[in-house]
Image (tube, rainbow, N blue to C red):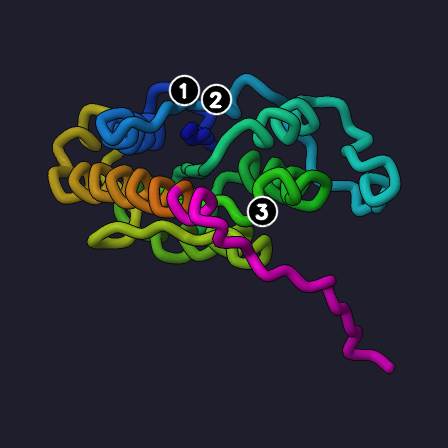
């Protein structure tokens, strides 16, 4: 079992990374392999709304999104982390997730996912909500903790002082490891997901 954690911050070793690393430690202790994907290494563009990916099965922009989608197929769960920017997720992460889920959501569907948010003071709840919406539209079980998945601090050093936030991350990792094991046992027992073809309607008739 493997979980891919995405650091949506421009700071590769900042507060968001600190939170993700704590989740990863708990997952590793539970027998789950992890990898942290650093979005800061990519210059991700926003979605063009061209719909080409519906025909080509990949995004027409070559900036790392297609490589991530291919990588995602090899993982069993995901954690997307972001700092708070104006009470929302970072622009880079939003552009990245827009294109990943639109062009390659099938490689993430039906796999457990979680949002992790870091903030100095406020805006965590709305940011948490923004990220979770990608999961709930893509048939992905959302993993929680004993509090909303957030950590507080203006620097990585300050985040390490947030004992409640760190515990939240550890419990999140434990819960995801547990859910992955449950899913594995279910598959081994022959339990299958009931799927339906997507029905789409417009408000304008």
The residue to which callout 1 is attached is 12
Horizontal and vertical percent for residue 92? 56, 34
Magenta span includes 187:
yes
The residue to which callout 3 is attached is 109
| Label 3 vs label 1, nearer the camera | 3
Horizontal and vertical percent for residue 97? 59, 41
Of residues 171 and 30, the one drawn nearer to the viewer in this rendering: 30
N-terminal-most mark, 2 or 3: 2
Residue 29 visible somewhere in the drawing: yes
Q: In the rendered structure, which segment of residues is drawn in magenta?
A: 185-205
For marks 2 and 1, give the CA distance. Answer: 6 Å
Horizontal and vertical percent for residue 94? 57, 42
Q: Secondary structure at mark 3?
A: loop
| Label 2 vs label 1, nearer the camera | 2
For marks 2 and 3, give the CA distance. Answer: 22 Å
Q: What residue lies at 15% left-to-right and 38% top-to-bottom?
A: 162
Please give the label number shown on residue 38: 2
Q: Secondary structure at mark 1?
A: loop
Q: What residue lies at 79% left-to-right and 74% top-to-bottom?
A: 202
Horizontal and vertical percent for residue 195? 63, 60
**Residue 108 picture quarter:** top right
Q: What residue lies at 88% left-to-right and 41% top-to-bottom?
A: 55
N-terminal-most mark, 2 or 1: 1
N-terminal-most mark, 3 or 1: 1
Magenta span includes 201:
yes
- Work out which residue is located at the far bottom of the displayed protein and give it: 205
Quadrant containing the C terminus in the rendered view:
bottom right
Tell me if label 2 and label 3 are in contact, CB under 8 Å: no
Q: Is residue 160 left or right of residue 98?
A: left
**Residue 101 picture quarter:** top right
């Amino acid at each position: 079992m493997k979980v891919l954690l995405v650091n949506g911050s421009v700071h590769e070793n900042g507060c968001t990374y600190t939170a993700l690393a704590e989740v990863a430690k708990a997952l590793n202790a539970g027998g789950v392999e992890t990898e942290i994907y650093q979005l800061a290494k990519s210059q991700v563009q926003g979605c063009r709304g061209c719909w080409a990916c519906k025909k080509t099965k990949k995004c027409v922009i070559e900036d790392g999104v297609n490589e991530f989608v291919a990588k995602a197929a090899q993982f069993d769960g995901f954690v997307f982390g972001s700092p708070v920017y104006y009470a929302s997720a970072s622009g880079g992460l939003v552009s990245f997730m827009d294109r990943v889920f639109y062009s390659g959501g099938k490689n993430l569907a039906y796999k457990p996912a979680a949002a992790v948010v870091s903030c100095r003071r406020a805006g965590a709840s709305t940011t948490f909500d923004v990220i979770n919406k990608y999961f709930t539209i893509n048939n992905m079980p959302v993993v929680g903790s004993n509090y909303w998945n957030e950590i507080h601090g203006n620097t990585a050093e300050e985040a390490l002082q947030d004992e409640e936030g760190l515990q939240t991350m550890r419990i999140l990792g434990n819960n995801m490891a547990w859910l992955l094991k449950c899913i594995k046992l279910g598959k081994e027992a022959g339990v299958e997901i009931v799927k339906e073809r997507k029905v789409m309607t417009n408000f304008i008739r």
